[in-house]
Structure formats: structure tokens, C-alpha cells
Image (spheres, rainbow, N blue to C red):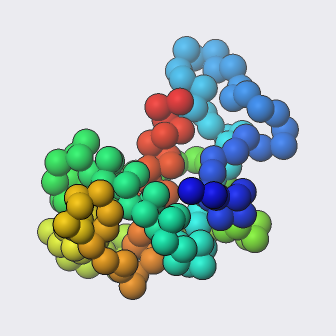
């Protein structure tokens, strides 16, 4: 798969330096991750099949950790507590939307449809229309990756 930097959402250090600051309280440096930035994917990026499939695989991995749609939905709420700068690919600030409006179904059934696999079990059965929902789930995965780093 040939993915250039323009088509991949990445977590990158800020220009101020490549390492997280030392934290005198002994906490992980990423808990005070004010020198980290995240770039969310735009709709046009999520529309590309190789990227869509890559994002789908990563969200499926994270879903398996939670084991239920409701638990994953609850975890998404932690995005509001994350103190990292989040940007669109064009550099404008990304604001985490109201999750109750974005996911009005408490059972989060949308996720089951999204994660459904094709006959091979290796690819999504279909592409979903709601790229905003995919973007938020993938943003959560990026945050989880930062916390685990």
C-alpha cells in the first residue's frame, strides 16, 4: 500500500521539540502531553479505500479491547479531557463534537454495522456514509496510541 504523508493521519511532536517534557510528579510524560499534536483525517482522506481499510482495522483492534459497543462509546467521551492540540490537515483547529448528537443511539449499533466484515473477514463489508463518526473513533485510537507510547 503506497501511502504518502498527505493521506495518513499521524501524531507528530510539536515544533518546540521531539520529546515530551520531563514531569517532576513522576507521571508519564504523555499525561502532560502539551507538546503533542494530532492531525485528524479529512473526509477526502477517509474516502480513499486503502486509508479507509487501514482506519477500519485500527478501530476494529480497539473495539476488541472494549468488547462492547457501549463501553467503546463511553471511552470516546474521554476525548474531551485530552489536552493535546488537534488539527485538521489544513492546520485549522479541530474541535471534538458533541458526542450525544453524533451518536444518539445509547447502544451504539452504528459501530456493529461499521465493523462488519466481508466474506474474507479481512476487510469491511461496506463503506459508511458518516465519515464524522469514523473520524472520532479513529481519533480515539490515536489518543490511545499516544497514551501507550
Q: State the residue in front, 114 or 33.
A: 114
* Residue 4 as seen in the image, left or right of residue 121: right
Q: Residue at x 63, y 58 (%)?
A: 2
Taking the image as shown, residue 29 lies to the left or right of residue 78, namely right
> In the figure, is residue 81 to the left or right of 127?
right
| Residue for point 31% across, 77% down | 126
Decide which of 69, 98 is in the foreground and name it.
69
Dividing the picture into quarters, in which one does residue 123 lie?
Answer: bottom left
Given residues 106 and 148, the one toward you in this image is 148
Residue situated in front as seen by the camera: 44 or 2: 2
Residue furthest to the bottom in view is: 129
| Tally of marks | 0
In the image, residue 80 sits, relative to residue 33, either above or below, namely: below
- For the question of whether residue 86 can be seen, the reply is no
Q: Position of residue 72 (x, y in %)?
A: 26, 55
Give the residue drawn at x 57%, y 17%.
25
Looking at the rendering, which quadrant does residue 115 occupy? bottom left
Residue 106 rendering spot, x and y as whole percentages: 18, 70
Residue 10, percent across and down?
Answer: 63, 51
Q: Which quarter shows the N terminus?
A: bottom right
Residue 81 image point, x, y percent: 47, 50
Q: Which image quadrant is residue 93 in? A: bottom right
Residue drawn at (27%, 51%), measured in percent from left and top? 63
Is residue 46 in view from this perspective? yes
Q: Is residue 44 left or right of residue 110?
A: right
Amino acid at each position: 500500500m503506497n501511502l504518502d504523508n498527505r493521506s495518513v493521519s499521524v501524531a507528530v511532536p510539536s515544533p518546540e521539540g521531539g520529546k515530551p517534557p520531563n514531569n517532576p510528579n513522576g507521571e508519564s510524560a504523555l499525561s502532560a502531553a502539551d507538546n503533542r499534536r494530532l492531525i485528524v483525517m479529512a473526509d477526502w482522506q477517509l474516502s480513499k479505500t486503502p486509508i479507509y481499510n487501514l482506519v477500519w482495522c485500527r478501530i476494529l483492534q480497539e473495539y476488541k479491547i472494549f468488547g462492547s459497543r457501549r463501553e467503546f462509546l463511553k471511552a470516546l467521551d474521554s476525548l474531551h479531557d485530552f489536552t493535546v492540540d488537534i488539527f485538521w490537515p489544513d492546520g485549522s483547529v479541530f474541535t471534538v463534537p458533541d458526542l450525544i448528537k453524533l451518536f444518539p443511539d445509547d447502544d451504539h449499533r452504528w459501530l456493529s454495522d461499521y465493523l462488519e466484515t466481508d466474506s474474507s473477514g479481512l476487510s469491511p463489508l461496506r463503506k459508511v456514509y458518516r465519515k464524522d463518526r469514523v473520524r472520532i473513533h479513529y481519533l480515539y485510537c490515536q489518543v490511545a496510541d499516544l497514551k501507550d507510547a
